[in-house]
Amino acid sequence: MAVLDVQGLQTHFFTHGGVVKAVDGVDLRVEAGEILGLVGESGSGKSITGFSVIGLIDPPGRIVGGHIRYLGEDLVGAPERRLRALRGKEIAMIFQDPMMTLNPVLRVDTQMVEAIHAHEKATAKAALARARDALAMVGIPSPDERLRAYPHQLSGGMRQRVAIAIGLLNHPRLLIADEPTTALDVTIQAQILHEVQKLCRETGTAMIWITHDLAVVSGLADRIAVMYAGRIVESGATAAVIGSPSHPYTLGLIDSIPTRATHGTLLRQIPGMTPSLLNLPPGCAFRPRCGRASDECLMVPQAAPGPAGKVVRCWNS
Ligand SMILES: Nc1ncnc2c1ncn2[C@@H]1O[C@H](COP(=O)(O)OP(=O)(O)OP(=O)(O)O)[C@@H](O)[C@H]1O
Ligand SMILES: [Mg+2]
């Protein structure tokens, strides 16, 4: 059974300006020990997808359709009590902003021990030892000193690493990491990616790694789902998505990655701009930017089986 099986998820925001369909019919599946990379431009709905899974959608937002099955249990409509018990324990999220995890008025050791005690009885000594291990895992030097610090005494990169360590603390079965390494320098980023990959392999943690950076997930993820304007436009094994993209949007993303070969030449860009979700064009949302657009594209393409076991939403792929 998949650890996470999301089907037809729709999360909409009912704003004064209209209905923002931030997530509109998303399907995702992650098995134990597997890493799924969720990729897309800013505003495509990646974070809202993650928040939906951990049950953190607040008004004016609401899950209006679909299923989020965690080990077979549908979390859509599950009581808040049940979600609270799962959150931070079996299902953890590392947020884009570390201060969504960290409490500014508590020392790091206090918060880490509390995060453990929220879900289990452990001696203070054992909890502290686990906190220290988690900090070491994300490459924090002199962890004892950091444990005694308050968040404001840490650099931004260090805060981010502490937040990642808190996410790992209770050995979640499902970990959703929302661009947690974007602000870190490349060597630290590589170390963290290596560690989380090892964690998934060794403990069977299922992971969703959210990023706008296709280069990051190409080395990390087993499978990739590409998101555009609230929908997954292409998903499949990493090699199949990156090596032979089927959707014109995926192709555009790959073409805009700098490589050594393109050094000195002007990078190709996807023409046009990400559409406003309040004002989506009818049919395929990528149509106005797409070189392959045809008359069919005025109708929303359904997710269909593509080459190499992929699922693709495009009339002309
Ligand atoms: N509270 C809200 N009210 C109205 N619209 C919202 C709200 N929260 C998010 N949205 C909209 O939902 C869409 C998806 O947002 P989301 O944060 O998931 O994007 P993202 O893919 O994570 O982008 P980024 O890469 O910039 O983090 C955006 O258009 C955003 O404006
Ligand atoms: Mg985001």
Image (spheres, helix red, strand yellow):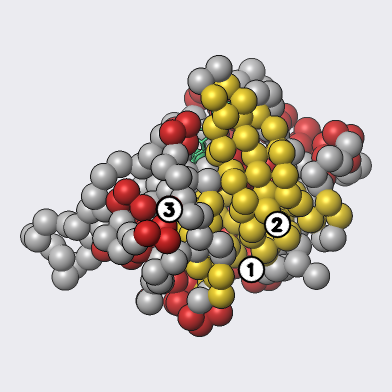
Q: Which amino acid does label 2 sit on?
A: Gln
> Residue drawn 15% across and 65% down?
262
Q: Is residue 10 left or right of residue 237?
A: right
Instruction: From the image, tell me which residue sits under label 1.
Output: 34
Q: Residue 64: give x, y in percent of width and height.
A: 71, 39
Query: Closer to the observer: label 3 or label 1?
Result: 3
Looking at the figure, which quarter contains the N terminus?
A: bottom right
Instruction: From the image, tell me which residue sits under label 2.
Output: 7
Of callouts 1 and 2, the N-terminal one? 2
Q: Is residue 4 visible?
A: yes
Q: Residues within 10 Å of mark 1 (few under 14, many from 20)?
A: many
Quarter of the image for residue 182 reads top left
Q: Which of 59 and 202 is in front in this view?
A: 59
Q: What secondary structure is marked by label 2?
A: strand
> Residue drawn 50% across and 25% down?
153
Q: Which amino acid does label 3 sit on?
A: Leu
Query: Closer to the observer: label 3 or label 2?
Result: 3
Q: Residue 269: give x, y in percent of width and height.
A: 22, 53
Q: Residue 153 carries which label?
A: none
Q: Residue 298 carries which label?
A: 3
Q: Residue 171: give x, y in percent of width and height.
A: 74, 54
Q: Is residue 246 left or right of residue 58?
A: left
Tag 1 and tag 2, C-beta contact below 8 Å: no
